[in-house]
Image (tube, rainbow, N blue to C red):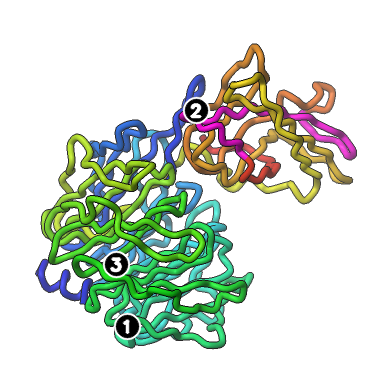
Amino acid sequence: MRRVILRTLLSSALFGIATGAAVAQPFAYVANANSNSVSGYSVDSVTGALTQLAVSPFPAGLGPYLITATPSGKFVYTSNSISNDISGYQLTGMSGALTSITGSPFATGRTPFFLAISPSGKFLYTPNYNDADISAFSIDGVKGALTMVAGSPFPAGTGPQALAFSPSGNYLFASNAGSDNVSAFAVNSDGSLGQLTGSPYATGSYPFGLAVSPSGRFLYVPCTHSGSIYAYAIDNTGALTQISGSPFATPGQPAHVAITPSGRFLYAAESPSNDVAGFAINKTTGALAPITGSPFAAGSYPYTVTITSSGQFVYVTDASSDQVSGYSIDASTGALKPLDPPTVATGSTPVSLAIANPAVKTCGAPDVSREATLAPGTYTRQSRGSDLWNETLGITNGVTPISGPLSVVLADLPSSTTTLSGTYPGLTTTYCFSAAGNYVVPIDSLIPPGNDDTLLPGELLSAQFVFATTGGSGVKPTHYKAKLISGTLDK
């Protein structure tokens, strides 16, 4: 049975470290296609090592294929390629346990393979391989239940296999393994899909697990039977143009690719050569160049690649070895070094891995930024040679009183910085995170006591944050957004 599934499949990050306040543990989950289960692991954010959870494994449908988590880390989903449905789980507490979402499993078309969740966390999509279409669902932000989007499913090419979003969430790309092309869709505000003019775009033979660069400028499509990766430039309408030098030859047959958050490196899981091919990405042209030392040895039948949002670690599912291989990434060269231990056991035929971090999330708390003006201040370096930078965020309320508890979400914080709440000097650290992600900092203490935890119309609050760069790189945290939320957080 295993070999049958593998032939069918191939012929398919957030770390937080807290100081001074309890923060939930990041977890990794693996879909085991022949065990009909999900294995769960705690993630050591310093070493990258995976340790199986005592409460693992968790039941799934038949032939669980792709596993993914919402950006908040609150919900986890698997596509079940044999039972034709999606299992939904809620991640709560500190144990990493997954509990079934009410209404799960959710019906799809025939042979759902990959899953893709929109960057907003509002919508989930799966390609139905044997129906030549894509099912679209809205995600209940509180309970995690899936509801079919009006007009779903949406037509795709023959044998749609994998999906990838642009970082903006405006465009969705699908690899069509049966018709050797890629479909491009505009994503509407209600989650419906509209195929773009000029789509589909020709690829090599059997396009598979595609990836979009963090800049949103390039799409990479591994073509398994061609032994190459096709690369395309994405214009501001979502249209694709094959770049100079494409396709780029690979040592083996690439099944799935992933790109580091920095956009500097791309890795491809390959079989039957049983390795991971590494490439440096030219950020201007999108061209690929092999990394010194590539390819890097893996287990038997490496299948999918997952990179942590910190850009420090890579995990590869070795489908025929029933294990996950882990590597650290050399930030300068992109070379991979096996972790210690280098592998961890899974269930039968691990196909994919997802990382979920429930440490920081809004958990249904309403975004009230529309009622207030959030004005970031200028960065001030604390002292010459210091890695500490101050910023004061001015929050001016509008005409509607906003009741507490209030928090500021630092959204899309880059991995090169650590956020510290408090003031400097005499800094009192309540939250300290050293990885990319969305982080919640309570500001209720700033509301005047007489307001009864309410931000009054026209009232101004000044929330000061101190950012500390990691590794002495001196990079200022200029690439994040702040939003104001109201409501009790599920911690």
Q: Amino acid at mark 3?
A: Asn
Mark 3, residue position: 80
Residue 150 visible here: yes
Which residue is rendered at x = 19% and y = 67% of the image?
Answer: 252
Question: Which amino acid type corresponds to the residue marked 1 in the rendered image?
Answer: Gly
Question: How far is the residue under mark 1 from the one under mark 2?
Answer: 48 Å
- Which numbered mark, 1 or 2, is in the foreground of this view? 2
Stretch in magenta: 453-477
Residue that label 2 marks: 472
Q: Nearer the viewer, mark 3 or mark 2?
A: 2
- Left or right, 401 with respect to 226, comes to right
- Residue 87 locus on image (x, y percent): 35, 61
- Helix, strand or loop at disc 1? loop
Q: Is residue 488 left or right of residue 281?
A: right
The answer to whether the residues at label 1 and label 3 have Cβ atoms under 8 Å apart is: no
Q: Residue at x 27, y 70 (%)?
A: 249
Q: How many marks?
A: 3
Distance of mark 1 from mark 3, alpha carbons?
A: 16 Å
Which residue in the structure is indicated by mark 1? 159
Q: Secondary structure at mark 3?
A: strand
- Please identify the quadrant where the N terminus is shown: bottom left
> Residue 107, position in %: x, y?
38, 72
User: For numbered disc 2, what is the local secondary structure?
Assistant: loop
Q: Residue at x 24, y 45 (%)?
A: 326
Say few, some or many: other residues with alpha carbon within 10 Å of mark 2 (under 14 / 14 to 19 / 20 or more): few
What is the three-letter code of the residue carrying label 2? Gly
Q: Is residue 457 magenta?
A: yes
